[in-house]
Amino acid sequence: MNGFTGFALVPAAVVRLLGIAACLILGGGCSGTPDAQNAAADRAPADSAAAGAAVPLIAVIRAADWIGREWAEDAIRVGLLESDMERGRDYELKVSSAQGDLATLPSLIDAAVDAKVKVIVTLQDATLEAAVQRAKTVPVVFHLLSDPFAAGAGTSDSNHLPNITGVYSPGFGDPEQTRRVDMIRKVVPRAKKIGVLFSPEEALSVGFKDRMTKAAKAAGLQVIATPVSNVGDVGEATRSLCSQKADAIELFGNAAHAGFASLIKVARECKIPVFSPSPFEVVNGAILSFYPDFQEGGVEAGKMIGRILKGESPANIPFYRVQTTKLVVNTGDAGKIGITISPDLLKQADSVVGEDSSKK
């Protein structure tokens, strides 16, 4: 969780709990890189299992790794803590990832079922899709996704598969992608072309691309849609957007997010501003993110898991729709590519990072 100083992503009521829980869970402090912290979290359940801990096992499965993933998982742990569920006493976690290879998700779900876990936590839409098909009886709680209905989990918040519940945010806080287009126009008033990196294998990513194309067209802008099928494609795809003179870049899909380091490196060289639905990518070079309150959602998901571990059926727990949205801007990286964030937009921002954040 390093590198987020001054970045208030967590609701004030749980800031202290989240910080304490993260330090305790990740093993003796909050120093070290996020990847090292995440590895420590992944190892802990296996160590406990080896020691013969007779506590319920929760399998957390994500479709891909992304910047800031430990924050979402820490928020789930806070929800469990608020439900009086203590790690090591009331539950253990085992985290696994498809690392962007969505074809491996069914095997990860099968492994969790075979391990007789008490709850499967699916992160991202593709993981829930696999769980709907493979986990017919094991309780499933989803989080960090946009459309559980498209995945076949139910037809409404209260009418859903009896073993599945969870937290979602349509369009990641912007169902028709109109506000994202509006933000791009405010930051880059002379923009004519928006480059969009998307994953053609992911229906949700394609849907976001299509909706942004429609919203951009209504605003008089053109979208240059560029597919990326794996992390290795991201740098070259970004360079293609440079050669096509894109004025801004937005990204959707697991491959693009997993390859963000390559994306931002090329975008900086070309001096093209990057906009993202992930606030964690703003800390790493994107200049603006409009997003649902992931921490609110994570805490709610954790509370759902707690209710299930205490014996409640997922069938009786309605889906939770995250209503709160937030805006974060990066004035420092914007300035490095010659962009000035307007005072009006800064006033709208929930958080500001970069060299000018103290002037907010």
Image (cartoon, grey):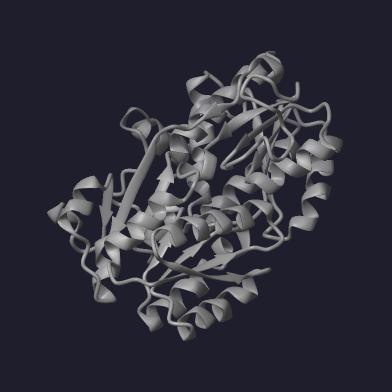
Which sits in the foreground, 32 or 98? 98
Mark yes or no: residue 1 visible.
Answer: no
Q: In the current view of this chain or complex, which residue is farthest to the bottom?
A: 243
Provide residue 341's location: percent of width, then percent of height.
22, 62
Residue at figure coordinates x 62%, y 25% from the top left: 305
> Residue 174, percent across and down?
46, 45
Residue sitting farthest toward the left: 359
Q: Position of residue 120 (x, y in %)?
A: 71, 34
Check the image and report above or below for 172 versus 140: below
Residue 275 quadrant: bottom left
Q: Is the residue 257 above or below the residue 203 in the image? A: below
Closer to the camera in the image, 77 or 229: 229
In the figure, residue 205 lies in which quadrant? bottom right
Residue visible at 40% across and 34% down? 324
Q: Nearer the viewer, residue 226 or 268?
A: 226
Q: Is residue 219 above or below residue 46?
A: below
| Drawn side of residue 316 relative to residue 349, left or right | right
Report the number of numbered marks. 0
Residue 271 seen by the camera: yes
Say left or right for 351 vs 37: left
